[in-house]
Every structure is written in C-alpha cells, then in structure tokens.
Amino acid sequence: MTTNGDNNRELPAGVPAEVEERLKPSALTRGIRIFVALAVVTAVVLIALTVNRDTLEGLRRIRWYWLAATVVLWLIATGSDGLRLAVLSRAGEHRIGILRSCEVILVGYFMAAITPFQVGGLPLQLYSMHKWGISPGRASAMLLTRGILFYGMVFVSAPFIAYHLGVSSLLLRVLSTYIGVVVTVGAAVIVFGFAFPGVIRRWRDSSARKEKPGRIRRLLTKGLAESEHFIAGLRLFLRGRNFGYLAVAAGLTIVYGVTYFGMSASLLAGLGVLHGVDALRAVGINSLLTAVLLFVPTPGAGGVAEAGAAGLYAMLCPRYMLGIFVVLWRLFSFYFGAITGGAVALKHIAR
C-alpha cells in the first residue's frame, strides 16, 4: 500500500474492523455509560469532600465575566486547533477547511471519552478523513504531527514546570523518566523510519506472509504498515514550501496551548480565588497534568484527572472551592469537547 496519488483510497489494514467494532451500539452505549458514571461519581465525591459552610459565601463572589472569558478561551483554543490541522492538510493532495478540521478533533475527544487511553479516537478520525478523500498515510501524518507539535512542547516544559512548582523530587524523577522514555522511543522510531525505510518494508512483508498470524503478529504487521505510511506522509512537511505550513502549525500550537491552559487561570479568577502571581502557576499545573494524563488507561483519564487536579491545584485554590473548580476545569478542558464531539460522531456514523 502506498500513500502517493489519489488512487490510494483504501483504509489501512485493520482500521475498518476496529472502527466497526467501536461503533457498535453496544460498544458505544457501554463506553458512554462508563464515561458518565466516572464523571458523575468523581464530581459527587469531590464536592462531598470539599464543600463546607464557606462554599456558599465563595459562590457569592463569583465573577461571571471571568467565566465568560473562559468560554471565549475554549472557543479560541478549539478554533486554533482546527486551523492547525487545516494548515497541515495544505501539504497533502486534499485540503480540508477549518470546520471539518474541528469536527475531526472533536470526534477524537468523544472517542477518547468512551475508550481506554486518550488516543482512542484515532481510528474514527482516520475513517472520517478517508471519507473526504484523504489517504490513510497523509491523515496519520497530519494527526500525529499535530500531536507531536503539542505534546513535544508539553513534554519539554514539564520537568521545568514541576521543578518551579516545587513538586516532590519523587514525582519529578518519575515524570522525567516517563517523558524521557516517550521522547526517546518516539524519536528513535522516526529516525529509523527515515534512515531505513526498506528495512521496515521488508519486516512488514515478512510479517504479513505468515499464513495464520496470531494477535501479536497482526498488531506488528499493522504497526509496521502504519509507521511506513506515517513516515511517507511526514516527509511532506520537510519539503520546500511545506516546511512553511509546519512552521505556521507550530505557531498555532503556541496559541492553542496558551488559550487551552489559560482556562484554568480564568476559572480560578472567576471563582475569586486567584492571586495575580499565581496565574502562571495555574497554567503550569495544567500543562503538567496534560503530560501525565496522556496515557492513563481509564476513558478520558476519568478519575485520575480529577484526583491529580485536586492534589495539584490545592496549592492555589482553597479547599472550600476546590471541588467546584475541578468540576468546572474538567467541563471546559474535556467534557465540552467530548459532548460536542459525540454529536459530530453521530453525524459521521449516520452518513
């Protein structure tokens, strides 16, 4: 399977079956139930553990204009993320507009909410983009390049943020090790794919020739095929004017990061508990949480995200408003995207 030209319109091996399996009514219903249950239980537990007689007085001090600003930040973050994917698509044979790009991103939020790990939306995203005429390799390259730009920024800054926040040395060591392993493995795969594309192709062909492959071999074959498509698509962004698209996307990544992480500071300001000197600390904690939560196995990092946020934001937010803040933070940082993405996903499925 190649990634060149308009004739490559088939989906990557394994993706149709995976998408079909995840979009079964029973699978969707089960995932939505787990997502809702986790959201409700964690919200109730947080509120029950933090609300006291001071909470009512704190609610009277809510500054609605800061909460309105949080909505604006969410819209800017979503729009800049969509624009970033639209810019990356300019390097391919099929360009997509900002609205469709936002649809792809929101679908990813929804699937991440109802499947383990936060990368669970990738198959449906590839499926949706394929229906618009984008080959699997190009679609993978666009989506993964978008992820590399954002998480590269997050991973590089996370140890410095942890150190500045005064997080315990044990957590800092664990976080640094985790980031080091992820960055090293990812860089090694990309460098090897660029340097030895023929080796990957031979490994893929050898693995695919097995008459009755087991589950591990099937996953290996699929992974090798996808890495080949990804490397082929990624080469696009290193050619001539396409490098300019990559630079623009990097700039939009900064805009997205500032607005997305800035929502935590505006929420604290809206609740009347943010001191001016703590605004950057609030943004830093959000960035740190994002780095840690990427590979949490619960759907949408449910439960872990709330517990981590409560533990870290306790440095800035008084206990009597902490539960309300964490619920609002999850609402803006994840739930809004997941709910909107669910409506978009149903539209895509109906087609």
Image (spheres, grey):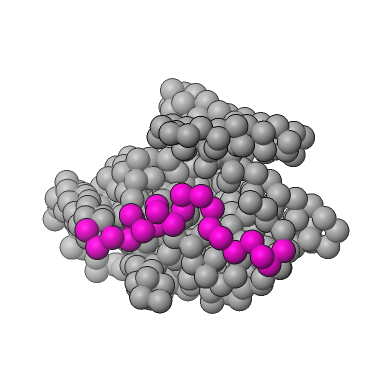
The residue at the far front in this view is: 211
Residue drawn at the location 54% of the way across and 65% of the way down: 130
**In the foreground, 223 or 236:** 223
The number of discs equals 0
Q: Is residue 141 left or right of residue 15?
A: right
Q: Is residue 166 magenta?
A: no
- Residue 61's image quarter? bottom left
- Residue 143's image quarter? bottom right
Residue drawn at the location 85% of the way across and 58% of the way down: 240
Does the image show residue 191?
A: no
Does the image show residue 60?
A: yes
Residue drawn at the location 67% of the way across and 38% of the way down: 201
**In the foreground, 219 or 86:** 219
* Residue 249 in the image: above or below residue 151: below
Residue 146, position in %: x, y?
A: 60, 55
- Residue 194's image quarter? top right
Residue 221, position in %: x, y?
A: 53, 38
* Residue 210 in the image: above or below residue 276: above
Residue 2, position in %: x, y?
A: 67, 53
Q: Is residue 177 left or right of residue 27?
A: right
Residue 30, position in %: x, y?
A: 21, 55
Q: Is residue 144 left or right of residue 34?
A: right
**In the foreground, 88 or 332:** 88
Boundaries of the magenta span:
5-26
Residue drawn at the location 68% of the way across and 56% of the way down: 3
Where's the C terminus, which quadrant? Answer: bottom left
Q: Is residue 25 magenta?
A: yes
